[in-house]
Image: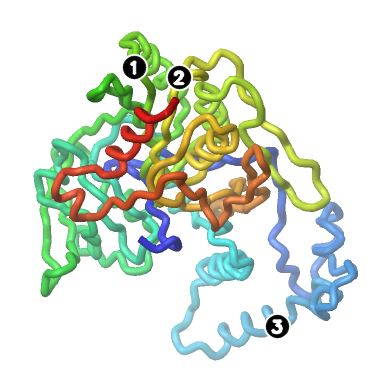
Amino acid sequence: MKKSTWIIIAIIGGLFITASAFSAGALVGNLLLPRPGSSWFERSPEILPSARGEDQGSSDPAAAASTEDLFIPFWEVWDIVHEQYIDQPVDEVAMMRGAISGMLDSLGDEHTSYMDPDQYFQANIPMDGEYEGIGAWVDTSSDYLTIISPMTDSPAEAAGLLPGDQVIKIDGEDMTGIDGTLVIRKVLGPAGSNVVLTIQREGETAPFDVTIIREKISIPSVESKMLEDQVGYIQIHTFAQDTRQELRNNLETILAENPVGLVVDLRYNGGGYLQTAVEVGSEFIGKGVILYEDYGPDQKLKEFDALKGGLATDIPLVLLVNEGSASASEIVAGAIQDHQRGPLVGATTFGKGSVQNWIELSDNQGAVRVTIARWLTPEKRQIHQVGLEPDYPVEFTEQDYLDKVDPQLDKAIEVLLALP
């Protein structure tokens, strides 16, 4: 899979919402669109000098212009649309929201974006580990919501969904151009109700419809079991609020069986809460730095150290990662790799090393997500858009999935048993 694709672990029957999960502090902003002749400057004395148009040494003429001059072209276009566009009246709210989206898109940061009020509301629907939906792991970053794999014994599995299936319509509604995380929401619904997915599948000549009956789906954030050769296996699905306690409960159970070592599986784990990442890392790292946050060249790095009391700080350890291991997963994997606590097996991780803050706009006009920092590994490695390279690269193909084999897990067990 290409590095540009973020395979994020998300439950198609629901999504762990991590809005503000990686935020630090609060940001306050204003919509900088003063109409010429307005009293905007008097109303906003706290605005930053650069936003007021004061020269900050930039060679860009627009940066040195006053804010009123800067927005003259914007208002010219605004008036042209109102006076000359064929379909009147125009939707001024939609135009305003489009302007905000365009402004944030111009920054070239895929993680800085705008959500309108409906999108923001849906993105903040509380989720607590129990969902009503179809049950599948999905990729939200492709052109269409793409099935990574259906969950075992789920409605998605019973309906015959396969890895690589693309959801191009939901209940007849075209999903082209709709953000994947919002497409997931459209699949949500009461247990017992139907949802019709139009599937585009490689090798099929035409899309086809699949009707699925939603069910209540409970998924823990941590699962564990003992494998052959006394190998303990722990899979962490996400970094939610209760993950630390779930992990400790599973560790206590596994460690009581005296395993020779642990394989910790972070594959397709798209992340979660920053504090949870520190807590999870601390279960395996006794002391030292878990990560740094970098707020820019003029700011001091913020250090996050391991917490005391980890249950598995000495036992032999191997981590499984892949292109779907992102954000909080990479925090833990980077710390374990830098501390030489255990090798990584699998594929290069996604490379999501930035920190976002959600700022709700006034008058129920939605919210903006702004990148405010990037995090670094304990060795101060930058993984954003780079990812972490595994110590033992191993591919996992679609055919492996269909054949029900796992060469990455097999390699992890081999590596673990060979550790001194």
Q: Is residue 13 left or right of residue 37?
A: left
Q: Does the residue at mark 3 contact the one at mark 1 (Cβ under 8 Å)? A: no
Question: Which residue is depicted at the point 67% across and 48% down?
Answer: 373
Question: Regarding mark 2 in the picture, which secondary structure is present there?
Answer: loop
Q: Does the residue at mark 2 contact the one at mark 1 (Cβ under 8 Å)? A: yes
Confirm whether residue 321 shows in the render.
yes
Instruction: Please name the amino acid that badge 3 sits on.
Output: Pro
| Residue 308, x across and y down, in percent | 60, 15
Residue 259: which disc? Answer: 1
For disc 3, the marked residue is 73
How many angstroms separate mark 3 from mark 1 (CA)? 68 Å
Mark 2 and mark 3 lie on one chain; the one further toward the N terminus is 3
Residue 315: which disc? Answer: 2
| Residue 283, x across and y down, in percent | 51, 21
| Residue 190, x across and y down, in percent | 21, 39
Question: Regarding mark 1 in the picture, which secondary structure is present there?
Answer: loop
Placement of 115 over or under 91, stated as above or below: above
How many angstroms separate mark 2 from mark 1 (CA)? 9 Å
Question: Regarding mark 3 in the picture, which secondary structure is present there?
Answer: helix
Mark 2 and mark 1 lie on one chain; the one further toward the N terminus is 1
Q: Mark 1 packing: few (<14 Cα in 10 Å), some, or many (20+)?
A: some
Q: Mark 2 packing: few (<14 Cα in 10 Å), some, or many (20+)?
A: some
| Residue 193, x across and y down, in percent | 15, 43
The residue nearer to you, when weighing 111 against 41, is 111
